[in-house]
C-alpha cells in the first residue's frame, strides 16, 4: 500500500507548490522509492484544455493525451512518475462524474451532497492514482491547487482531511507551503501570515507535519524557525526555508540540505536507501558553468504570460546542458512583424529561430514572415506544431507561387488549404475536428536531419492540434519547394506528416508534434538538442 504526501499552499498563490512537490518526488526517487504524482485543481473547467494560456499558462499534454496543468510539466522534468489522465483532476471533473452517477441512479435515492459524495469521489480519484502502472508506487504525492481559505478548495481539503482515516496511522504526511514577506522598514521576515494560514488549515482539521516557507531572497534564521515551529505546532526540523533559487533544478539540492526527504520519510515510517544524487549534481555542474552561449529568438503570441511556453523554455535549458552552452532565449510577439524588414531587423542578433504552438489567426502573417526570414537568411529554424503549419504555408506561398495558401483554421475558404482538417481532406465536412492529443508513433526517414537528431527510426512524440498537413500538396512541396517529409504516422490508407525539413539549409526542421513535452534536464529532447547545436554552429560561423 502506498503512503501519501499532500501538498497545500497558503498566504498567496504561485508560491511554487508544483516545483516543491516535484523536487520532493525527485529526492524520494533518488532514495530508490517509486513515486506517483497528481494535482487536484479546484476550478470548474473539466480540464485546462479550454483555458487561455494568457491566464493559466501552458497546457501540458501527457502520453495518453490528457490536457493538464503546467505543474505536471514540473513533475515530468524532475521525476520519472507516470503521468496520465489520472494525474490531474479538477472540480469540474469530480462534479461531472458525480452528476452522471446521480442521473444513472447510482446513489439509490439519496440526497447527493458535497460531504460525503463529492469528497468520496475526490478520494476515489486519489486512490485510483496508485492503480495500473503505479500499483507498485511507494509514495503518492498529491498537490492541491489554490490557497487555503479559497471557497472552491474546501471539498479537496475536506477530502484529504478524511483520507488519513481511510489509511493506516503514519500513512499520510501534510506539507503546507507558504509565503513569508520581508518588510524593509523592519528589516525582517514576517511569519504572521504563515501562522494565520496554518490556523485556517487547522480549522479545517488538517495539522501540517511540514511547513515550507518561501522567503524570496532571504533565509529564515534559527529564531524565526523556532517561532514558526512553536506557533504552528511543528517540529523545528520540519520547518523548511525555501528561498528563491536559480536554476530551478538546484532546488532539490537545497531541500536535501535541510533533510526534507528524511523528515517526510520519518513521518511516514518509511526506511529507504541513501540518496543517489550524483547524476543530478553532475547535470547541475554542467548547467552552471557553460563554456559558450547562444541566442535564440522564439516567436509566438502568448508572450505576455511567463509560463505560456513553459516546456519550450525548459527544453531550451536542457538542450543547453547537452551542448555545454547557455541558451539565452527571448520571446517575440509576431504581431509586431508586419513586414520582412521588421523581422530581419529584430531577429538579426539571434543564432536560431523557433516558432511555437498556437491557436487562432492573430499574428499569423508575422509568423509567415519569420519563416521566410529564417529560410532565406539561412538561420537554424525549428517549428513546433503551429510553427510547422506556418512553415508549410510559407513554402506554398513563396516557393509554389500560391499567394493565398493558408490553413483552414485561419482562412476556411482559402483556395489552397495546405493545412486543413483531416475530414476536409477526405471531403467530409460535417464531422468537425477533434484534437489529436497525446503520443503517436512516428517513423523517421533515414538520411534526414530528424533521423540524425534522434538516432533511431521509430519515435513517439506528443500531439495537441486539430489541423494537419494536407497530403494533396505533398508532391509539389517536395518537388518544387525542396521540402523533405522526414517522419510520418502511418494510418493504413494514408500517412500523416509528422515532421518535415529543408535539406538545402543549415538546419530547418518543423514538427507537427510537440517535442518540448518530453524534454527533461537528464534527457534533453533530441530535436531541441540538434537545433541548439545548429544554432551554435551558426553563431561560430558569424564570428
Ligand atoms: N492551431 C493549430 C491546430 O489546431 C496548431 C495547434 C498547436 O500549435 N498546438 O492544428
Image: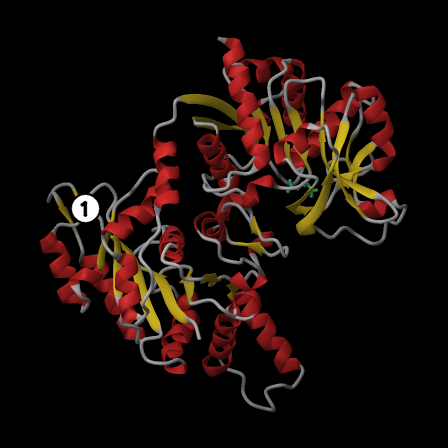
Quadrant of the image occupied by residue 448: top right
* Left-right relation of 540 to 216: right
Local crowd size for mark 1, using a 10 Å CA cut-off: few (<14), some (14–19), many (≥20): some
Q: Is residue 400 visible?
A: no
User: Which residue appears at 38% of the width and 32% of the height?
Assistant: 286
Q: Which one is nearer the viewer's eye here, 511 or 184?
A: 511
User: What is the residue that sits farthest to the top in this orientation?
Assistant: 543
534 lies above or below 104: above
User: What is the residue that sits farthest to the right in this orientation?
Assistant: 427
Name the spot of residue 345 as percent of width and height, x first.
55, 13
Q: How many marks?
A: 1
User: What is the residue that sits farthest to the front in this orientation?
Assistant: 273
User: Which residue appears at 81% of the width and 46% of the height?
Assistant: 422
Q: Is residue 312 visible?
A: yes
Q: Which one is nearer the viewer's eye here, 249 or 363?
A: 249
The quarter of the image that holds ligand 1 is top right
Name the spot of residue 239 as percent of width and height, x first.
21, 59
* Left-right relation of 156 to 197: right
Name the spot of residue 540 as percent of width and height, x first.
50, 13
536 lies above or below 202: above
Q: Quadrant of the N terminus?
A: bottom left
* Left-right relation of 111 to 398: left
* Left-right relation of 68 to 200: right
User: Which residue appears at 67% of the width and 14% of the height?
Assistant: 376
Q: Is mark 1 within 8 Å of ligand 1?
A: no
Name the spot of residue 306 as percent of width and height, x first.
45, 39
Helix, strand or loop status at disc 1: loop
Q: Which residue does the numbered mark 1 point to in the structure image?
A: 219
Q: How is the image coloured?
A: secondary structure
157 lies above or below 31: below
Amino acid at each position: 500500500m502506498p503512503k501519501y504526501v499532500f501538498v497545500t499552499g497558503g498566504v498567496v498563490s504561485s508560491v511554487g507548490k508544483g516545483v516543491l512537490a516535484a523536487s520532493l518526488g525527485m529526492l524520494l526517487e533518488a532514495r530508490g522509492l517509486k513515486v506517483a504524482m497528481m494535482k487536484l485543481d479546484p476550478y470548474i473547467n473539466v480540464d485546462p484544455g479550454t483555458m487561455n494560456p494568457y491566464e493559466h499558462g501552458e497546457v501540458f499534454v501527457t502520453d495518453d493525451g490528457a490536457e493538464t496543468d503546467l505543474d505536471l510539466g514540473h513533475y515530468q522534468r524532475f521525476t520519472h512518475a507516470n503521468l496520465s489522465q489520472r494525474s490531474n483532476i479538477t472540480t469540474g471533473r469530480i462534479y461531472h462524474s458525480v452528476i452522471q452517477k446521480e442521473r444513472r441512479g447510482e446513489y439509490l435515492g439519496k440526497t447527493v451532497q458535497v460531504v460525503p459524495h463529492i469528497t468520496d469521489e475526490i478520494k476515489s480519484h486519489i486512490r485510483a492514482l496508485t492503480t495500473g502502472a503505479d500499483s507498485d508506487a511507494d509514495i503518492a504525492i498529491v498537490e492541491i491547487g489554490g490557497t487555503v481559505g479559497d471557497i472552491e478548495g474546501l471539498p479537496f481539503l475536506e477530502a484529504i482531511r478524511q483520507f488519513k482515516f481511510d489509511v493506516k496511522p503514519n500513512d499520510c504526511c501534510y506539507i503546507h507551503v507558504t509565503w513569508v514577506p520581508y518588510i524593509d522598514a523592519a528589516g525582517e521576515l514576517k511569519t504572521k501570515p504563515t501562522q494565520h494560514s496554518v490556523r485556517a488549515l487547522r480549522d479545517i482539521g488538517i495539522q501540517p507535519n511540514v511547513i515550507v516557507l518561501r522567503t524570496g531572497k532571504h533565509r529564515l534564521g534559527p529564531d524565526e524557525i523556532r517561532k514558526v515551529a512553536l506557533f504552528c505546532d511543528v517540529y523545528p526540523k520540519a520547518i523548511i526555508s525555501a528561498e528563491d533559487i536559480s536554476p530551478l533544478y538546484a532546488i532539490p539540492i537545497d531541500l536535501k540540505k535541510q533533510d526534507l526527504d528524511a523528515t517526510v520519510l520519518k513521518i511516514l515510517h518509511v526506511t529507504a536507501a541513501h540518496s543517489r544524487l550524483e547524476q543530478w549534481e553532475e547535470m547541475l555542474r554542467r548547467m552552471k558553468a557553460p563554456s559558450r552561449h547562444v541566442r535564440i529568438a522564439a516567436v509566438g503570441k502568448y508572450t505576455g504570460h511567463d509560463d505560456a511556453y513553459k516546456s519550450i523554455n525548459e527544453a531550451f535549458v536542457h538542450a543547453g546542458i547537452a551542448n555545454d552552452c547557455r541558451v539565452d532565449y527571448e520571446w517575440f510577439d509576431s504581431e509586431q512583424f508586419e513586414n520582412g524588414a521588421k523581422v530581419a531587423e529584430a531577429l538579426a542578433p539571434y543564432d536560431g529561430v523557433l516558432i511555437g504552438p498556437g491557436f487562432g489567426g492573430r499574428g499569423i502573417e508575422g509568423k509567415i514572415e519569420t519563416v521566410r526570414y529564417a529560410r532565406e537568411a539561412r538561420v537554424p529554424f525549428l517549428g513546433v506544431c503551429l510553427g510547422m503549419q506556418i512553415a508549410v504555408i510559407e513554402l506554398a506561398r513563396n516557393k509554389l507561387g500560391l499567394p493565398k495558401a493558408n490553413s483552414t483554421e485561419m482562412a476556411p475558404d482559402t483556395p489552397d488549404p495546405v493545412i486543413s482538417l483531416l475530414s476536409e481532406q477526405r471531403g467530409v465536412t460535417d464531422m468537425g475536428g477533434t484534437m489529436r492529443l497525446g503520443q503517436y508513433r512516428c517513423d523517421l526517414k533515414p538520411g534526414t536531419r530528424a533521423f540524425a537528431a534522434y538516432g533511431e527510426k521509430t519515435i513517439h512524440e506528443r500531439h495537441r492540434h486539430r489541423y494537419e498537413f494536407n497530403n494533396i500538396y505533398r508532391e509539389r512541396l517536395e518537388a518544387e519547394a525542396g521540402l523533405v517529409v522526414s517522419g510520418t504516422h502511418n494510418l493504413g490508407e494514408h500517412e500523416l506528416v509528422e515532421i518535415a525539413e529543408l535539406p538545402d539549409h543549415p538546419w530547418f526542421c518543423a514538427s507537427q508534434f510537440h517535442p518540448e513535452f518530453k524534454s527533461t534536464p537528464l534527457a534533453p529532447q533530441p530535436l531541441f538538442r540538434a537545433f541548439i547545436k545548429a544554432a551554435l554552429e551558426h553563431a561560430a560561423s558569424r564570428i
